[in-house]
Amino acid sequence: MTDSYIAIDLETTGLNPKTERILEVGAVKVEHGVRVAEYSTFVNPRRSIAERITELTGITGDMVENCPDIGEILPEILEFCGELPLLGHNILFDYSFLKRAAVNRGYRFERQGIDTLMLCRKFMPETERKNLGAACDFYGIEMGKVHRALSDALAACSLYEKLKALYGEKEPEPFQSHLLNYKVKREQPGTKRQKEVLRDLLKYHKITLSAQIDDLSRNEISRITDKIISKYGRIL
């Protein structure tokens, strides 16, 4: 069974790693079943935070305004993780955001992983809800602030250790790490011409964009430009 890993959780501006950004990273390093280090940081997403995300996480624009963006802190995140497997509740979600950020900045990021959500689906009664809060409640695990990265990473760590203690000796295979499969190609930054066209469209149609244009990739600018033209028309 896997007893050394990085329990990790992200808070993000939305669900799609292609279009959304990381807001907060929380991680716990576990070596041979013992928690040895923690990592926690806010991340400036270079865009406004939707009200529904603030309601869910409590994270506001003011809280991240002066924080580093993901490119600045990615090296220390990767150093903290090392080569250990990643553990989380629906770990592929967090991995997809991290891998996309890493690949876009020239890092290779392939990892093994353990998903506590999959373990809950295997071992919990079918009628019980399997989200992190419900699973922790079912197994009597205290949680910190829900939908905050470090608290959720700690909760996932505790949940894994509880499940391993209850079921691991009899069924060790589900507690082994497996390769996380998420394919992503490096995105190219937006061109100068793309940015000019988008800025002109925004000004002409009096549209406020939630994201910072200089932070957008070529594909993102193209999608936004096409959407504006489709909805409002071209510049006459």
Image (cartoon, grey):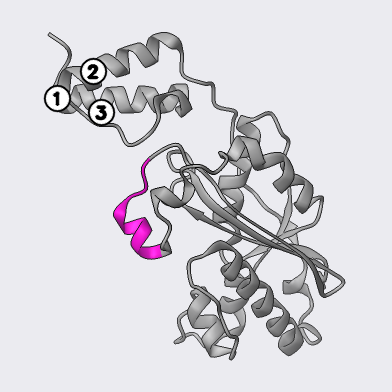
- Residue at 54% x, 26% y: name it: 187
Residue 118, position in %: x, y? 60, 70
- Residue at 73% x, 86% y: name it: 167
* Mark-to-mark CA distance, 3 and 2: 11 Å
Mark 3 or mark 1, which is nearer the start of the sequence?
A: 3
Q: Secondary structure at mark 2?
A: helix
- The kind of residue tagged 3 is Lys
* Mark-to-mark CA distance, 2 and 1: 9 Å
Q: Is residue 31 above or below residue 207?
A: below
Q: Is residue 192 above or below residue 226?
A: above
- The kind of residue tagged 2 is Leu
Q: Secondary structure at mark 1?
A: helix
Q: Which residue is mark 2?
A: 201
- Residue at 57% x, 69% y: name it: 152
- Residue at 67% x, 41% y: name it: 74
Query: Magenta region: which residues?
Result: 48-56
Q: Residues within 10 Å of mark 2 (few under 14, many from 20)?
A: some
- The kind of residue tagged 1 is Tyr
Task: Check residue 227 in the rendering and tell me which mark sits there, or answer none.
Answer: 3
Q: Is residue 152 visible?
A: yes
Q: Looking at the image, is mark 2 or mark 1 nearer the viewer?
A: 2
Mark 1 or mark 2, which is nearer the start of the sequence?
A: 2
